[in-house]
Image (cartoon, rainbow, N blue to C red):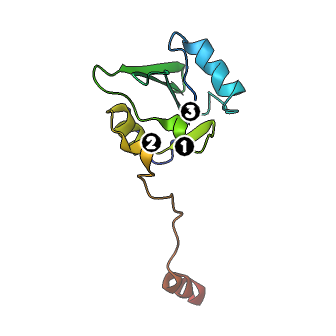
Amino acid sequence: MIGLSRRVRVFAYTRPVDMRKQYDGLYALVISELKADPLSGDLFLFTNRRRTRAKVLLWDGTGLCIYQKRLERGRFASLWLRDEQEVCELTPSELALFLEGSTLPGALRLSPPTTSPQVPTSFLHEAQRC
């Protein structure tokens, strides 16, 4: 899979997409439906109605890339059943599970919320003495 850090955001379009769409069609969906910048470095996930095919659109700094997968058995998790929203944000770990065919990413939130680093208060007191 793609080597990703927690800083990379993954946005899943929760409506079925015609998998014949290529770079320009998916690019247009990101702009018009997801209201996002396809050149941001974020990943954008799309699935077909039967949930047997998925595509991920991303900008790698030099051009657009499409990663696609077709499941031979089973279906991808149903991300469009979540609260009738058009966009669902996943973590890179959840994307990896989704692309492996796990049913969990659509059923419940798997990753903890992001946190910001905090400096211990004892360290702050030491710094103020100097």
- Give the labeled residue for mark 3: 14
> Residue 13 placed where, x, y %?
57, 31
Which residue is tagged 1? 82
Tag 3: residue type? Thr
| Outermost residue, top side | 20
Q: Is residue 108 above or below residue 27?
A: below
Question: Mark 3 or mark 2, which is nearer the start of the sequence?
Answer: 3
User: Nearest the camera: 15 or 59?
Assistant: 15
Residue drawn at x 50%, y 14% as measured from the top left: 19
Estimate the spatial distance between the alpha carbons at disc 2 and disc 1, rounded to whole Å. Answer: 7 Å
Q: Is residue 119 above or below residue 58?
A: below
Q: Are marks 2 and 3 in contact (CB under 8 Å)?
A: no
Residue 26's image quarter?
Answer: top right
Q: Are the residues tagged 3 and 1 within 8 Å (C-beta)? A: yes
- Amino acid carrying label 2: it is Gly
Q: Which residue matches tag 2? A: 106
Q: Residue at x 47, y 19 (%)?
A: 66
Which is more toward the observer, 7 or 48? Answer: 48
How many residues crowd mark 2 within 10 Å: few (<14), some (14–19), many (20+)?
Answer: some
Q: Residue at x 46, y 35 (%)?
A: 78
Per the image, label 2 sits on a secondary structure element best described as: helix
Horizontal side of residue 16 vs 107, given as left or right: right
Q: Earlier in the sequence, mark 3 or mark 1?
A: 3
Quadrant location of the C terminus? bottom right
Q: Which image quadrant for residue 22?
A: top right
The answer to whether the residues at label 2 and label 1 have Cβ atoms under 8 Å apart is yes
Residue 127 visible in image: yes
Q: Residues within 10 Å of mark 1 (few under 14, many from 20)?
A: some
Provide the secondary structure element on which disc 1 rests: loop
Q: CA distance from mark 3 to mark 1?
A: 8 Å
Q: Is residue 5 visible?
A: no
Q: Is residue 35 above or below residue 63?
A: below
